[in-house]
Amino acid sequence: DGQGQIVEYDPAFLSRVGWATNLKGTVFSIRSIWWQFSWLMVIAVGYAILSGPSASILDTMGSTVAPKGLAKLSFRLPSLKAQTFAVSLVGGLLSFLLSLFNSNGLDRWWKTRDCLGSVIGRSIDLSMMVSMYIRGYDRESDEIAYRYKREIIRYLNLAHMLVYRQANSIDELNDLVMDHSCNPPRQWITQEEMLLFQPEKQPKPGQLGEAVRRRKFFAQQLQARPRVTPKKEAPAQAQEDGKGGPTLLQQQHLEVPEGGLISRYAIVYYWVEELLSKASREGLIDSGRPEALFKMQEHVSKMRGAAADVFMYLYCKIPYIYVHLMTLLVKVYLIVIAAVAGSSLRMSWVLSRPADFLAAILMVFFMNLVYEGLLQIHIRLWNPLGFDINDYPQHRYQDYVWRATMQFLKKPEKILPSYMIPASGLFITRPTQGVAPGWVDDKTPPPPPA
């Protein structure tokens, strides 16, 4: 459904029967592995037709030793055995390298989740602080303070949403003006705010294939790299006359990039900072907590930094030379395995051994499943903010943050115990058995315990 969902599982059930019954989200569900198995079997059959009539052994020096009494035929490929030292050595070394390769990918995957968790957690923390610190001093100012709190909390949710949008190169924002996929519908962004971003018209997210999204993702990375063209300086005398070149103020205006806003989540956090500063100037932040503004702005800065770290892991990939070498080794090794299987198919046909025929097919299947599966793990981990079944459940995260932050906009009697609700200096208390009830006002001392 395009929502992205980390597969939930029970390790105990998985070790018993789940490994065979629950294959959703596993390497068995990757179509490219099955297509590659088909091509490897074609290579194996072709090698069986072109290989020698007997089981020649290719030793580590590359020489071919044929059994005695069998004629050597021209234009025949050498037969290989699975026990060949070179094949076994490469297989063991490749398994070790792939384990390190995937360990690196899993580490980056978890660090990305850690940064995203910081964005989620601090969004809730800041919503709680905004609810406590921003307040009015009369009925009119209370309404204004509520609007500040509502807009700040909405912006926190919008910034969280835009992190996923940018990670998937989704520029369209029309669906966020009124999101009918939620019940009740939610307004993440207003029409005016959307026009500030000036999004380019793109196909809907459901019409973009995963390969198209990936190409677009890397293309945007290249476009985002700054390219500065040196400007020619006008002669000093001409600048003094005001005729030879632009003034310093004009140069600053010329350096402002044209076009739409990039790093949209950062712009939204800027809006949050601006609203906090404006609320402080209007005296709507609790004066009894002078550190309140600093604490809230610090949370905004840390959220922006955590979101930037998410894109640090997405944009700065593992060096291509390393990834290319791992991919090349896997593909070449699987072709060699197909050749070994072809030799076994040839011998099983010549010697009429159906068991060897089946063993050759199973060897290609499991070797392809293991080595290509390990390679596919890296592909599935490169962008965990996507829509794959093993990606983060972004809709669940977005819904959780929305509900967790919006609850702080409820009336105090809906979220606070009665004795915590301030009412003209009074605290409405509720006596508890064995505990003295609270005092009625600041001047009345608490009565002794019963």
Image (cartoon, helix red, strand yellow):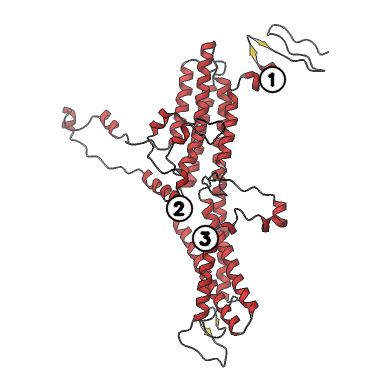
Q: How many marks?
A: 3
* Of the image marks 1 and 3, the number of the one nearer the N terminus: 3
**Residue at figure coordinates x 60%, y 22% from the top left:** 410
In-image side of 252 versus 147 (left or right): left
C-alpha separation, residue under disc 1 versus residue under disc 2? 53 Å
User: In this figure, which residue is indicated by the disc labeled 3?
Assistant: 32
Q: Residues within 10 Å of mark 1 (few under 14, many from 20)?
A: few
* Of the image marks 2 and 3, the number of the one nearer the N terminus: 3
**295 to 308, vertically: above or below:** above
Q: Quadrant of the C terminus?
A: top right
Q: Residues within 10 Å of mark 3 (few under 14, many from 20)?
A: some
Element assignment for label 3? helix
In-image side of 221 versus 93 (left or right): left
User: In this figure, which residue is indicated by the disc labeled 1?
Assistant: 417
Element assignment for label 1? loop
Q: At label 2, which amino acid type do we have?
A: Ala
**Residue extending furthest bottom?**
69
Query: Along the line of sight, which residue is nearer the eye, 234 or 270?
Result: 270
In front: label 1 or label 2? 2
Residue 213 location, x and y as percent? 44, 48
**Residue at figure coordinates x 69%, y 16% from the top left:** 419
Quadrant in which residue 93 is drawn: bottom right
In front: label 1 or label 3? 3
C-alpha separation, residue under disc 1 versus residue under disc 3? 57 Å
